[in-house]
Image: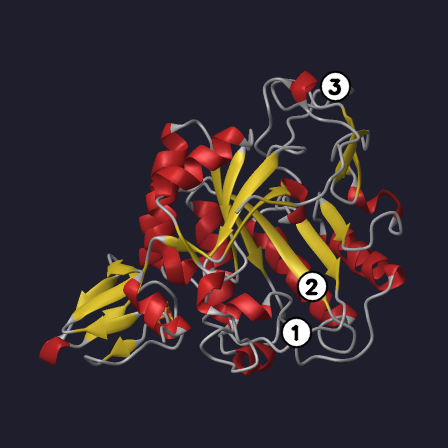
Amino acid sequence: MTTLADKLDSLTMAGHLFEEMDERMVRCTACAHRCKIKPGRRGICQVRFNQDGVLRVPFGYVAALNLDPVEKKPFAHLLPGSDALTFGMLGCDFHCDFCQNWLTSQTLRDPRAAIPPDYIRQIAPEEVVRIAQRGSAGVVVSSYNEPLITSEWAVAIFERAKQAGLRTAYVSNGNATPQVLDYLRPHLDAYKIDLKSMRDRSYRQMGGVLKNVLDTIRRAYDLGLWVEVVTLVIPDFNDSPEELWEAARFLVSVSPSIPWHVTAFHPDYKHDGQATTPAILQQAADVGQEAGLQHIYAGNLPGRVGSLEDTHCPQCRAALIRRRGYTIIDYRLTADGKCPQCGAVIPGVWTDRPETVQLGGWGLPRQVL
Ligand code: SF4
């Protein structure tokens, strides 16, 4: 019987993101773990492995393919109101105990994430792009698992997506290397990065290092990617005013115009405890505002966070985009991305045909494969 691991190993190609070492060892450069891998062994993510001195990497399948509202990623300044064809593979380089995608991210690492082999579907990059075009998507996104560890597959899709005039984006934990960011840059428009904590101790528990994530945020911004940052605010984990202040101050030091999404946690995977309330998100947003961030959004509690779902002009405070959950209720930006009231340029990636923005849509994800 074919196991999931057998099937995944058959859906691979020779990777681009690795360095050859002595004795057919390789060093993977797709994420900041930089695993040194002996022949016949796997990296920490379990999905990249050394076969006779060549790093084999995932290629040619999806474990999920959905048309999601781009607001669900969440992106607030990337073609609001458009659909994002979102694909995911399997595996992750972190093991956060509050993961909200753990069935796909922890496959091969946690026996409870028992996904059957027929869950994954073989597909060509051209077909993914055709599905995006048929669904009138504006953006193609790699998400659900950690995209950095499957970057060769993402680039194969993104090259074709950009030829078709689509935007491309990553939804990632930010555990990147300079090599993977340089590899992605010609093919990537936008990068959503999780900033899960400002405590290195907390990152070590998840299997990461705080500095690597901070470096990725700064580097992605300096490379000219459109960057939005998300902090899942978890009571008694990262919701102290001091920690939120440090996160906001760091983002301001990169750019006050980076949108910061403070989103509500609900108990999942191995993390029990209290769900995040609207009041906690409001406090986090107040901290961000005081620190000097211009665009702060509260997520996962639609209709319960006042105007914190909306986009405001940082200069005159006019409401430019009103939202409820993933639905756009009103869109007032001009075709050249300015506030119609005071003329301020609003940073982001905007449509030059604002009349086409869909208002009052369902705002629901649709499975397409
Ligand atoms: S992607 Fe990261 S975890 Fe996976 S093999 Fe490469 S360096 Fe290791």
Q: Residues within 10 Å of mark 3 (few under 14, many from 20)?
A: some
Q: Residue at point 89% right, 51% down?
A: 304
Does dot 3 land on a helix, a strand or a loop?
loop
Q: Which residue is mark 3?
A: 340
User: Which circle, 3 or 2, is nearer the viewer?
Assistant: 2
Q: Which residue is mark 2?
A: 232
Q: Nearer the viewer, residue 190 or 87?
A: 87
160 over 221 or under it: above or below: above
User: Which circle, 2 or 1, is nearer the viewer?
Assistant: 1
Q: Which mark is residue 69?
A: none
Q: Nearer the viewer, residue 326 or 233?
A: 326
> Mark 3 near mark 2, Cβ–Cβ under 8 Å?
no
Task: Kindly tell me whether residue 170 is visible in this rendering.
Answer: no
How many angstroms separate mark 3 from mark 2 (CA)?
32 Å
Q: Residue at point 31% right, 75% down?
A: 35
| Of pointers 3 and 2, the one earlier in the residue sequence | 2
| Of pointers 2 and 1, the one earlier in the residue sequence | 1
Q: Where is ligand 1, by quadrant? A: bottom left
Tell me residue 164's x, y (percent): 40, 28
Q: Residue at point 66% right, 81% down?
A: 270
Q: Is residue 173 left or right of residue 5?
A: right
Tell me the quadrant of the picture where the N terminus can be found: bottom left
- The three-letter code of the residue at mark 2 reads Leu
Q: Which residue is mark 1?
A: 98
